[in-house]
Image: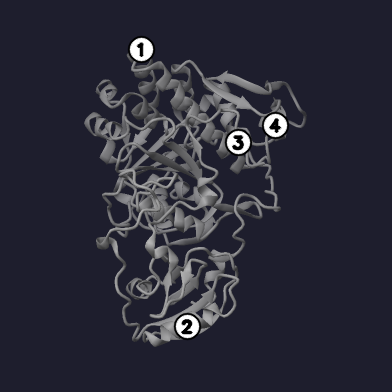
Amino acid sequence: MAGSHKAGAAGRREGGGSAAPQRRNKRSRARIAGVTGLSVVVLAVAGGGWIYFQLNGNIKTFDDGGISADRPAASTKGSNVLIIGSDTRSGDNAQYGHGKGDIGRSDTALLLHVYSDQKHAVAVSIPRDSLVDIPSCKLPNGSWTKEKHNVMFNSAFEVGETVQGNPACTQNTVEKLTGLRVDHTMIMDFAGFAKMTEAVGGVDVCVPGNVYQGDLNPKLGHRGSLIFAKGPQNVSGQKALDYVRIRHGIGDGSDIGRIQRQQAFIGSLIKKVKGKGLDPTTLLPLANAATKSMTVDSGLGSPSKLISFAMSMKDIDLHNTKFVTLPWRYEGARVAVVKPEADALFAALRADRTVDGQNAAGKSESASPSPSAAAPAPASGKGISVAVYNGTVTKGLAAQVAESLKSAGFTVTGATTAASQDYTHTVIEYGANDEAKAKTLATHFPGALLRQAKAPGLNVIVGTQYKADGAGGADAASSAPAAVPSAVADKARSADDNICSNLSYG
């Protein structure tokens, strides 16, 4: 296990430092995950659930027998909805873009957390090229795959190579990545997205610079005609698809930059629908367009279930509808997940903490925890071995922590410097069969983040929030609830933000 922290620690610089993304000459797909998937959320936020009475028969369900039995525990602290955009070219989708419809594919996906106060929501974009671990997934013949490590996130949807894709595998992957239980999963295709934008009379967007045909399709070989002129404009149908899939010619030319514009598009769409009010002549065509191209898990497969889901979000206003992106950094042509910031983000969502530092009841993030929430007393480490790494620039910290753990009965197998010295939270890594030992170790580091690793054994990577005391040690975070990292919160977009602001990372 020693040294396994390096994969999670390497290169913690967030948000595209000096390393530029490598551009690949692959066919341009309409990467609209999150834009199409949030159509149902748009309806819920804008109008409540009553409209679903009109939609019986539209909804298709997928086989959720492929959902892993090894899942995070259910929680009463809000709910989580996975939204996947499918770019299958079968059926009505064949008229949009190019390519074959033999395999269902996904690109960017979003995990929507609806807070327990039902007045806040945050959508976390997961880049398609993120390098993640894909757990065992069910194939069409009923067998299960072996776990895969350090592979592209969007490849989970392609497991089994069917036209419908494998949403259960993507859900398993998201649950493993986040530690959050996914309550519902939705899949939308881009035929529904195009019809949806037409149903609302178009969506207001902003283009930071002139965009030509060659930007949309680099294989064209020349600039081509002007597609979008610089500035605000209204788009629908194919034009809306073109806007959300543009990568080249805008910002840094990356998929990450495209996510930022997709988030702005979704916010603008929500604003458009809310501005029209509860008008059935608008909402019913929108609902029909969305649901006819939507596939959901069995938990949402009826009008009554959709009504309940929609009603849980009807009171969320524009400003409290937030969009963030999974902490990331470039790793060649791919995207690496930046830890421990990503772990801290998901810990905050598990604790039902909002982006702006509130809990589901609206209390300040700085509020002290109740006595019932106090951390357990430090437990004996007898029979438990652990390696200690210093994830800070404080000299001698690993040795100091090692001595503290030895005095508590732990066997310390090593004390050295971590591969990166910019850890904020203390992180405890544990093997597949070592979770109980990790929880015992965590009693000595209140506020630490727990993360399962590939190799057996225990590592503790000490962050800057660790502060020693006379009894041994404790994290400074132990007196404060989990919080969304400032690096994530500072870049959050609200649905009421100006459509021309922060359109690209580049």
Q: Contact, CB < 8 Å: mark 3 with mark 4?
A: no
Distance from disc 3 to disc 4, alpha carbons, whole Å, reads: 20 Å
Distance from disc 2 to disc 1, alpha carbons, whole Å, reads: 67 Å
The numbered disc on residue 469 is none
Distance from disc 4 to disc 1, alpha carbons, whole Å, reads: 37 Å
Q: Which residue is mark 3?
A: 502
Residue situated in front as seen by the camera: 67 or 340 = 340
Q: Contact, CB < 8 Å: mark 3 with mark 1?
A: no
Q: Residue furthest top?
A: 281
Distance from disc 2 to disc 3, alpha carbons, whole Å, reads: 45 Å
Q: Contact, CB < 8 Å: mark 4 with mark 1?
A: no
Task: Please determine whether, in this image, residue 109 is positioned above or below residue 173.
Answer: above
Q: Which residue is mark 2?
A: 402
Query: Measured from the top left, where is residue 275 in percent x and y?
Result: 42, 19
Say what amino acid the circle numbered 2 marks: Ala
Say what amino acid the circle numbered 4 marks: Asp
Disc 1 crowd, CA 10 A, few/some/many (<14, 14-19, 20+): few
Disc 3 crowd, CA 10 A, few/some/many (<14, 14-19, 20+): some
Quarter of the figure with residue 421: bottom right
Name the secondary structure under disc 3.
loop
Distance from disc 3 to disc 1, alpha carbons, whole Å, reads: 33 Å
Disc 2 crowd, CA 10 A, few/some/many (<14, 14-19, 20+): many
Q: Which residue is mark 4?
A: 215
Q: Which residue is mark 1?
A: 281
Say what amino acid the circle numbered 1 marks: Thr
**Residue at image point 55% right, 24% down:** 240
Name the secondary structure under disc 1.
helix
- Left of 208 or right of it: where is 158? left
Query: Measured from the top left, where is residue 224 in percent x and y?
Result: 74, 24
